[in-house]
Image: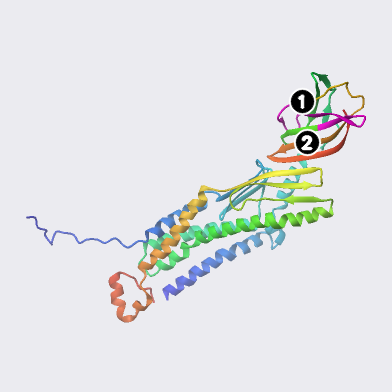
Amino acid sequence: MGERALGWGLKLLGIALFVGPFIAAFAVHNWDLQATVMPSQEEMDELKETLSGLFGEGFSEDTFILENPTYSGGKIRIPVRFTSPLDLPIKITDLSFAISDQGVEVAQVEMEETEVEIPANGTVDFTLIGPYTGTPPTDPQFTDMNITFEAYGVTLQMQVGQGGEV
Amino acid sequence: METTNPKTSRPKRRLAPVNWFGLVAGALMLMLPFLGPWWRATVGTGAMEVALSPFDYSISLLGQPISSTLVGYFLLAAKLSVIIGGVLMIAGSVGAKRWWGRQLVRFGAMKVFWMLIGLILLLVLGALFLNSILPGMLSGMAGEAGGAAMQINVPYISGSAMSTIQIGATATITAPITASLTSVFWIAVVVAALGVAARIYHRRFVKPKKLMVKPAEDEAEDEGIEAPPT
């Protein structure tokens, strides 16, 4: 009798520990399935705010400013000022593009630095460098732009075909 | 020649039989829910962090925590279940020859074992879903809106992998994913093994039912097995 009662008691305890959380969780959320299973609206709002806040005002023509290039020793050097619109620290690990003059590719430039770290909403200066011989281009265009960012260890690589004037 | 005086020598006291495996497993079961996560995964360097155990979980996206009430209550119940199981296991192991010993040990013995199996299944099925099913679903949805190819590589249980999302021909997002089992997982493996051993070892304290028939009752009493109250 006692053994059987204990057996049933333990079985019921096991069932209660399995079914109880269901009932308790639904009861605290007034039997609302979505509120019980999904994260709270407050958490979702905070997450949305964090994600939308990351991109700040977004990229604009002031994000990358290419200064006047210099030509010396068979090389072209283009100083770049990058103003991050992002609310998070990022790294630029690659920035390269081709320079064309009158429709003919005359140079290929890439970052002199291995990588550039930019604090949230910060500004950094770095240099693009590439081999160049001949006279300075009269109507320079940059094409085949490659840029690689890294944030939180996640890499975003972008390729842009046609650019603007250097 | 030395002789012993039967009047002064004390009778040898036999220690009550104890299921030592169960005692140790029960004690560890009381600690296990408070030792931390059994498994961790990270996307990038903190873009997303997941820490799991059958008693607790934490998911954060860019440092922002995400939670579910239902999951929280379930894990709380799992915690209570293992703590109660641990207490009953200790009681059943100490009173190994009592009529209730076997049932108390049985209640707690396999709990951590099944939790381990459950967690491993969850991780394998979760990785299978993320690797094989989700990319197809999301690529299909994105395809209608412009085109994106997604290749998610989540390690099965433990390891590192790279996942990529190709958005058209212009952008590629690459994220390293690292997953690992923590030392607490291996403690849980030891607890589960001790639980299974305790259950098997406890058989030595239980007489087969056919010996418990009326004529053998005296013999059972001699062995020290307490009969259940009627």
Q: In the depicted view, which residue is nearer to us: A136 or B166?
A: A136
Callout 2: SS? strand
Sooner in the amino-acid sequence: mark 1 or mark 2: 1
Residue B37, disc:
none
- At a point 70% along the width and 29% down the height, the residue shown is A114
Which numbered mark, 1 or 2, is in the foreground of this view?
A: 2
What separation in Å lies between label 1 and label 2 (alpha carbons)?
16 Å
Q: Crowdedness of circle 2 by 10 Å Cα count: few (<14), some, many (20+)? A: some
| Residue located beneath label 1 in the image | A125
Give, as a three-letter code, the residue at label 1: Asp
Q: Nearer the viewer, residue B193 or A9?
A: B193
Q: Is residue A51 left or right of residue B71?
A: right
Quadrant location of residue B77? Answer: bottom right
Picture residue at 60% right of the left edge, 51% below the top: B57
**Coloration mode:** rainbow
Quadrant (top left/top right/bottom left/bottom right) for the C terminus of chain B = bottom left
The reply to whether the C-beta atoms of the residues labelled 1 and 2 are less than 8 Å apart is: no
Q: Secondary structure at mark 1?
A: strand
Residue B159: give x, y in percent of width and height: 59, 48
Crowd band around label 1 with a 10 angstrom C-alpha radius: few (<14), some (14–19), many (20+): some
Residue A130 seen anywhere in this rendered image of the structure: yes
Q: Position of residue B34 (x, y in %)?
A: 51, 50
Residue A62 appears anywhere in the view: no
**Letter of the chain that mark 1 sits on in the rendering:** A
The spot of residue B144 in percent (x, y) is: 84, 55
Name the residue type under label 2. Ile
Decide: is B40 above or below B111. above
Mark 1 vs mark 2: same chain? Answer: yes
Magenta residues span A97-124
Q: Which mark is residue A147?
A: 2
* Residue at the image point whose x is 27% and y is 72% from the top: B222
